[in-house]
Image (tube, rainbow, N blue to C red):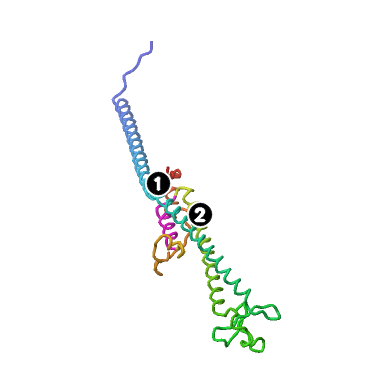
């Protein structure tokens, strides 16, 4: 039988001290662990709150469906009036072309085939291309007074040129309307982008379209100062989307 000798008071003291030290170290370790855990939880809470705020800001920046539907309706109206203006333009072009062709058919013809017109005062002669001819080439007195005069022909040519320019402007505006509609259909458009598109469409409408819509001509200082494409989100929106890691779904169209 093994006899266990009682510990001395020094041994008991040392053992008790060791146990207390271990207990203190354990408590300190647990305290540090709990503090670190609380810190992680707090950081996660702050980060989640920041993401929610950024997401809310991002969602608020995108144009609401009602505004998009309203702008689409405006595009349809402007497009319809542009088509009407193009039809009126085509009719006017046909009329002025007939007028020009009629005057060319009745004009004096030079030996080289050029048609010429005497001015109303009978002092000058111009060819069909607007070149003034000297009396060595053709004498105004040699042109029958019943022939078409230069001024009506000149004005008809100028009208035709103006109508062709108007037609090009209308076609360009149609393209602008189509581009705006395509941009809307892609979705994910901010209110800032929508405002830019709307201002561009309204300010740059050709006079023929504005007349159809009953709108006044824009003042010179009403022209947009920037023509930055609205095909992408502003930089701050891109940053928010990268932070949140969220790309909102396309907004639904009307109906």
Image quadrant in which you'd find residue 195: bottom left
> Dots 2 and 1: beta carbons under 8 Å?
no
Q: Secondary structure at mark 1?
A: helix
Between disc 2 and disc 1, the foreground one is: 2
Instruction: Please check the rendered image and state whether residue 99 is part of the magenta-colored stretch, yes or no.
Output: no
Image quadrant in which you'd find residue 110: bottom right
User: What residue sits 39% from the left and 68% below the top?
Assistant: 219
Q: In the depicted view, which residue is nearer to us: 142 or 197?
A: 142
Find the magenta span and give its range: 189-203
Is 145 drawn above or below residue 233 in the view shown?
below
Residue marked by disc 2 = 178
Residue marked by disc 1 = 65
Q: Which mark is residue 77?
A: none
Image quadrant in which you'd find residue 93: bottom right
Is 6 drawn above or below residue 182 in the view shown?
above
Q: Is residue 92 left or right of residue 44?
A: right
Please tell me which of labels 2 and 1 falls first in the chain: 1
Image spot of residue 72 (x, y percent):
44, 51
Quarter of the image for the N terminus: give it: top left
- What is the crowding at mark 1: few (fewer than 14 residues within 10 Å), some, or many (at least 20)? some
Quarter of the image for the C terminus: give it: top left
Instruction: Please check the rendered image and state whether residue 195 is part of the magenta-colored stretch, yes or no.
Output: yes
Is 146 drawn above or below residue 69 in the view shown?
below
Q: Main secondary structure of the magenta part?
A: helix
Q: In the depicted view, which residue is nearer to us: 29 or 144?
A: 144
Is 229 drawn above or below residue 126 in the view shown?
above
């Amino acid at each position: 039988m093994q006899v266990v000798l009682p510990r001395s008071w020094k041994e008991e003291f040392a053992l008790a001290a060791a146990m207390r030290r271990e207990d203190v170290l354990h408590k300190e370790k647990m305290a540090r662990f709990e503090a670190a855990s609380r810190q992680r939880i707090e950081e996660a809470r702050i980060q989640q709150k920041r993401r929610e705020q950024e997401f809310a800001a991002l969602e608020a920046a995108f144009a609401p469906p009602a505004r998009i539907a309203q702008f689409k309706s405006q595009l349809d109206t402007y497009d319809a009036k542009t088509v009407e203006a193009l039809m009126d333009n085509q009719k006017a072009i046909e009329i002025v072309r007939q007028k020009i062709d009629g005057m060319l058919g009745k004009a004096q013809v030079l030996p080289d085939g050029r048609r010429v017109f005497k001015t109303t005062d009978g002092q000058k002669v111009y060819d069909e291309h607007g070149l003034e001819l000297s009396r060595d080439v053709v004498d105004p007195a040699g042109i029958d007074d019943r022939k078409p005069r230069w001024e009506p022909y000149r004005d008809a040519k100028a009208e035709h040129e103006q109508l062709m320019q108007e037609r090009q402007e209308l076609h360009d505006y149609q393209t602008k309307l189509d581009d705006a509609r395509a941009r809307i259909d892609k979705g994910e458009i901010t209110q800032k982008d929508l405002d830019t598109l709307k201002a561009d469409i309204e300010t740059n409408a050709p006079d023929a379209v504005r007349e159809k819509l009953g709108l006044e001509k824009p003042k010179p200082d009403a022209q947009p100062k920037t023509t930055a494409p609205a095909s992408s989100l502003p930089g701050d929106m891109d940053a928010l989307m990268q932070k949140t890691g969220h790309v909102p779904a396309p907004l639904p169209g009307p109906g």
